[in-house]
């Protein structure tokens, strides 16, 4: 990724920003995939050259109605072309200037913004063709190298980790044939390998704030710290107007001191500057009271954000206990704002504050992406690295300090940018040869113990961490509360805030159902092993892992219980759940034979036909779509959320539930003639 001087890198465009980043990536990739199949001869261009950008935006808001709730411009455009849709699609419709602007600004431009995020992360190229890494993410599976096989994370986690490891932030080309670069992910690993934990706000600023333009000034390694304030200050170009001591006019001030999002704060900034300047020129009791009133007034936070890096600009006490003038002078001795350098100092502080505020805002997506690798834990207020011992050994064979920042030729830059869109494993990203990999594996066995199965040990570590996390955050009564909250979709935002804003409520629902069964089982099952979800570093759900498997598969010694969870209402269940649930149940029953499989279909409400159709399938012979094998007695038992709540509250065990199902379904005799169809035809 290339950025300009004084820019902060950004992984997600602010236009269309959303919490569920990973879910959004998958949605946008699937839309592009479907558009490519439906319209293979159209390119990613604006109308009238192509309709793809319009079609993408329409599909995006339909796929995420809870995210894109307001789209009046699009609605107005849709209303107009509804009677002229064929002409529009054929690109022969003459649009008025107003409609052309609606299409360009409120539809196509947004489509370009949303999909630009896929380009930044390497999942699609600039022409919106899905890259090999994008296809990997959609398929949910990759080939792992010898080191990756040790990592107890899903393939989705790993794909994201690979992309972040490959991500480099580059300077724009200079006169020479070289560029400087910065690797945020390597910096994140460096910080966490050299510290037990790191303050989350410090971590955000360090990872997001470093610029490749500071190569000559950065001393990353000697003190394990980058002084962003000094680096930003050193890189700040002071406008000539601010290099003199004369008071700057309101109009001139407003041309240089601005707010990225609003013009309403500029008068607030100037009022503060004017009071400060007047005080510096005449530090009297009266001028101090005017300044103090502004510093402690209703706009205090805005002033601190603009000129104090988010903290107090000058110490003057509080509204309850304001400092007297003498105390103010004493507390602020040496503050450059109170000297004749006030104009220069104020502009420096404004530049640093603006840069740090931008870094804080843009860090939101970077933090979510790092967390979604399953390796970075962001349990506030500290950041930690999972499986630190493993990475300590692996990266001891890698010149990590030198790889965080560096310089490449233009040819190397072009090759690295090409590789960003390719499926490249950890070993190749870090440029380990076969001998290096063998040395790492030897060192890992020394570190973990010669007879230890390293992956199994790391998986067990995650199992125990998840179980502890469940006990602390999701006790029985909380799971019952969440199950009942799910029944009302007005509670979606509250549920997301409690569990994980990065995940959709259907994904969270699967997670809750798995924990509910954990309590019903008397805590004897492993939630970690049963989930078909991608978890983040804090072991919260991020996205369904895919791969065609059921939602939750619990393996007992003598049976298998699969739970299929849906938030669809009774009408939607018939369209969206009958086929996949039946397919999953048939396939698992066939592949697990002779072990018994019990599929539990869990929804908020059930209709009469669904209940009885699930019962009826147990009486017929069915065929696996995976292997073609015939199987009998496919058991699918429907339950509601309230049933699970009752089981938990009344301590009704999994053994008792399964025994009751088994006894009832055994009454359905598998006396099915699977040649009945042929026999009827033979009589005709």
Image: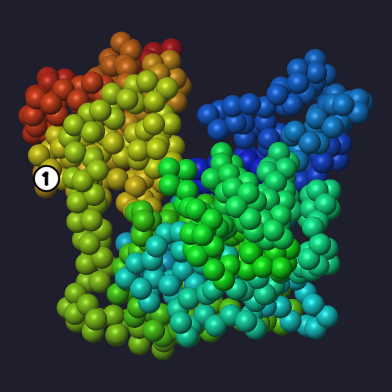
> x, y percentage for residue 567?
38, 26
Q: Is residue 415 left or right of residue 299?
A: right
Q: Is residue 558 above or below residue 357?
A: above
Which residue is most to the front?
A: 285
Q: Is residue 491 above or below residue 595?
A: above
Give the residue drawn at x 52%, y 80%: 220
Along the line of sight, the residue nearer the viewer: 229 or 453: 229
Q: Is residue 87 above or below residue 114?
A: above
Q: Is residue 87 above or below residue 107?
A: above
Q: Is residue 324 left or right of residue 549?
A: right
Quadrant containing the C terminus is top left
Q: Say few, some or many: other residues with alpha carbon within 10 Å of mark 1 (under 14 / 14 to 19 / 20 or more).
A: few
Q: Is residue 49 visible?
A: yes
Give the residue drawn at x 68%, y 37%: 56
Along the line of sight, the residue nearer the viewer: 21 or 341: 341
> x, y percentage for residue 196?
32, 70
Quadrant containing the N terminus is bottom right
Along the line of sight, the residue nearer the viewer: 398 or 193: 193
Helix, strand, or loop for circle 1? Answer: loop
Say which quarter of the image contains residue 98: top right
Along the line of sight, the residue nearer the viewer: 206 or 293: 293
> x, y percentage for residue 186?
49, 72
> x, y percentage for residue 317?
47, 52
Say which quarter of the image contains residue 157: bottom left
**Disc 1: which residue:** 524
Q: Is residue 288 left or right of residue 188?
A: right
Give the residue drawn at x 44%, y 37%: 504
Q: Is residue 141 visible?
A: no
């Amino acid at each position: 990724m290339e950025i300009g001087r004084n820019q902060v890198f950004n992984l997600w465009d602010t236009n269309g920003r959303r919490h569920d980043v990973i879910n959004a990536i998958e949605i946008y990739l699937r839309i592009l995939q479907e558009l490519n199949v439906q319209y293979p001869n159209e390119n990613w261009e604006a109308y009238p050259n192509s309709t793809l950008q319009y079609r993408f935006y329409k599909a995006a808001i339909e796929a995420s109605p809870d995210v894109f709730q307001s789209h009046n411009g699009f609605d107005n455009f849709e209303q107009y072309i509804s009677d002229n849709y064929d002409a529009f699609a054929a690109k022969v419709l003459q649009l008025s200037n107003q409609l052309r602007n609606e299409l360009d600004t409120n539809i196509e431009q947004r489509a370009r913004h949303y999909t630009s995020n896929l380009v930044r992360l390497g999942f699609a190229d600039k022409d919106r063709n899905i890259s090999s890494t994008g296809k990997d993410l959609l398929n949910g599976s990759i080939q792992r190298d010898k080191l990756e096989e040790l990592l107890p994370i899903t393939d989705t986690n790993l794909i994201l980790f690979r992309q972040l490891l490959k991500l480099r932030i580059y300077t724009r080309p200079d006169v020479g044939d070289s560029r400087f670069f910065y690797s945020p992910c390597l910096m994140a690993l460096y910080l966490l390998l050299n510290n037990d934990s790191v303050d989350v706000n410090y971590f955000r600023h360090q990872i997001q704030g470093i610029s490749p333009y500071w190569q000559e000034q950065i001393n990353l390694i000697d003190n394990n710290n980058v002084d962003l304030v000094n680096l930003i200050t050193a890189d700040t170009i002071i406008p000539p107007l601010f290099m003199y001591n004369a008071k700057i006019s309101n109009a001139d001030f407003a041309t240089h001191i601005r707010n990225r999002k609003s013009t309403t704060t500029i008068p607030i900034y100037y009022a503060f500057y004017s009071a400060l300047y007047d005080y510096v020129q005449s530090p009297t009791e009266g001028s101090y009271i005017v300044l103090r009133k502004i510093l402690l007034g209703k706009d205090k936070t805005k002033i601190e954000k603009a000129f104090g890096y988010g903290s107090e600009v000058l110490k003057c006490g509080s509204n309850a206990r304001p400092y007297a003038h003498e105390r103010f002078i004493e507390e602020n001795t040496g503050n450059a704002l109170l000297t004749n350098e006030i104009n220069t100092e104020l502009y420096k502080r404004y530049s640093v504050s603006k840069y740090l505020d931008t870094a804080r805002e843009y860090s939101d997506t970077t933090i979510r992406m790092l967390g979604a690798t399953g390796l970075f834990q962001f349990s506030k207020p500290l950041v930690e690295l999972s499986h630190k011992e493993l990475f300590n050994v692996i990266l001891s064979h890698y010149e990590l300090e030198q790889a965080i920042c560096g310089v490449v030729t233009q040819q190397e830059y072009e090759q690295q940018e090409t590789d960003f869109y390719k499926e490249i494993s950890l070993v190749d990203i870090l440029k380990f040869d076969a001998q290096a990999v063998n040395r790492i594996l030897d060192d890992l066995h020394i570190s973990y113990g010669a007879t230890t199965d390293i992956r199994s040990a790391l998986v067990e570590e995650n199992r125990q961490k998840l179980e502890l996390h469940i006990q602390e955050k999701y006790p029985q009564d909380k799971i019952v509360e969440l199950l009942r909250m799910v029944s009302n979709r007005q509670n979606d935002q509250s549920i997301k805030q409690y569990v994980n804003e990065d995940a959709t409520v259907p994904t969270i629902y699967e997670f809750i159902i798995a924990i509910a069964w954990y309590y019903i089982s008397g805590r004897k099952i492993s939630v970690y092993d049963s989930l078909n979800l991608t978890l983040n570093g804090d072991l919260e759900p991020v996205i369904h892992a895919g791969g065609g498997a059921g939602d939750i598969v619990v393996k007992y010694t003598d049976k298998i219980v699969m739970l299929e969870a849906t938030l669809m209402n009774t009408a939607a269940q018939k369209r969206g759940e009958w086929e996949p649930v039946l397919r999953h149940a048939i396939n698992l029953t066939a592949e697990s034979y002779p072990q018994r499989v019990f599929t539990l279909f869990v929804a908020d409400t059930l209709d009469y036909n669904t209940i009885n159709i699930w019962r009826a399938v147990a009486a017929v012979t069915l065929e696996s779509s995976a292997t073609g094998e015939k199987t009998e007695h496919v058991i699918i038992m429907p339950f509601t959320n309230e049933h699970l709540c009752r089981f938990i509250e009344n301590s009704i065990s999994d053994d008792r539930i399964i025994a009751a199902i088994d006894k009832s379904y055994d009454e359905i005799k598998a006396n099915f003639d699977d040649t009945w169809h042929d026999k009827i035809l033979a009589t005709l």
